[in-house]
Image: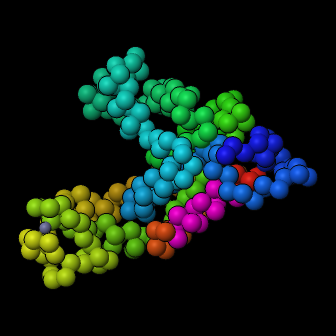
Amino acid sequence: MKASRREVDGFAGGGGSTTVPANAVSYRIPRNDVAVPVILLGAPGAGKGTQAKRIAARYAIPQISTGDILRENVVRNTELGQKAKAVMERGELVSDDLVLPMVADRLCQPDCAQGFILDGFPRTVRQAEWLDEFLRSHDFGGQKVPPVVVSINVGYNQLLQRLTGRRSCPIDQKIYNIYLQPPKSDCVCDLCGTQLVQRKDDREEVISERLQSYQRQTLPLVDYYRRQGRLREINGEFPADQVTAETFAAIQESAAGGA
Ligand SMILES: [Zn+2]
């Protein structure tokens, strides 16, 4: 069932007062059909991928990452894709001059009309400012909609355990965590008894470097959204279902104009 457009008035204007129509009996009905542009922040290991999938399913909006957009443009051989391919082949990072138009193009696709969830974008304050400007000049669900920014927070030590504890079975690929989800007997697979292995990327030196560089890069972005009063912080150390419930609640609240 579609919500009436009046019902989503709280979205418009971003920061304006929320007017609830007098006859809005349905005001408390979960708004699974309003436009929700969601920006999801979270360190590697914070469970962002799982939550992104659930949000995408719950609100029927696409999950968008810059990696996917890049690959898609390269595959479709668009002009931007050709330029990006050349840059990547030289081993360089694709600059905003190429990334931003690709993101704009993606967000204008029909499947984004009711919102989208961005994973891994924006990465910098400059990209965040660009996105704000983009959202101010485009309609989503017939409205100008400010993004809902959700940060899934997990402490450094917990992230380290989640990432460095990961082991997998080389035969059937079953994944364990020696701290959080250990196999029944030491370091061998429950299913086939094979010795579990650790990926090179999951070694502590690699992980701590990844976490620190994420932290360095994301802090200014977190500050940017916090200053605007738009940052919704979720404790990601709770079980995944609880994190999901709180994430949905944060989105509903923001979408209802509480941002
Ligand atoms: Zn196995």
The answer to whether residue 103 is above or below residue 148 is: above
Q: Which residue is at the front of the view, 202 or 179? A: 179
The answer to whether residue 31 is above or below residue 5 is: below
Query: Can you say which quadrant of the picture contains the C terminus?
Result: bottom right
Q: Is residue 85 magenta?
A: no
- In percent of the image, x 60 and y 52: which residue is there? 149
Q: Is residue 88 left or right of residue 29?
A: left
Q: In this view, does 205 lie to the left or right of 171?
A: right
How far from the left and from the top, in percent, is residue 17? 86, 50
Q: Is residue 150 left or right of residue 119?
A: right
Of all residues shown, which one is farthest toward the right?
22
- In percent of the image, x 71 and y 33: which residue is there? 142
Q: What stretch is highlighted in magenta?
A: 242-253
How far from the left and from the top, in percent, is residue 111? 53, 34
Q: How is the image coloured?
A: rainbow
Q: Quadrant of residue 208?
A: bottom left
Magenta region, mostly helix, strand or loop? helix
- In percent of the image, x 57 and y 61: which residue is there? 247
How far from the left and from the top, in percent, is residue 104? 54, 29
How far from the left and from the top, in percent, is residue 164? 28, 68
Image label count: 0
- In percent of the image, x 34 and y 70: which residue is there? 162
Of all residues shown, which one is farthest toward the front?
1
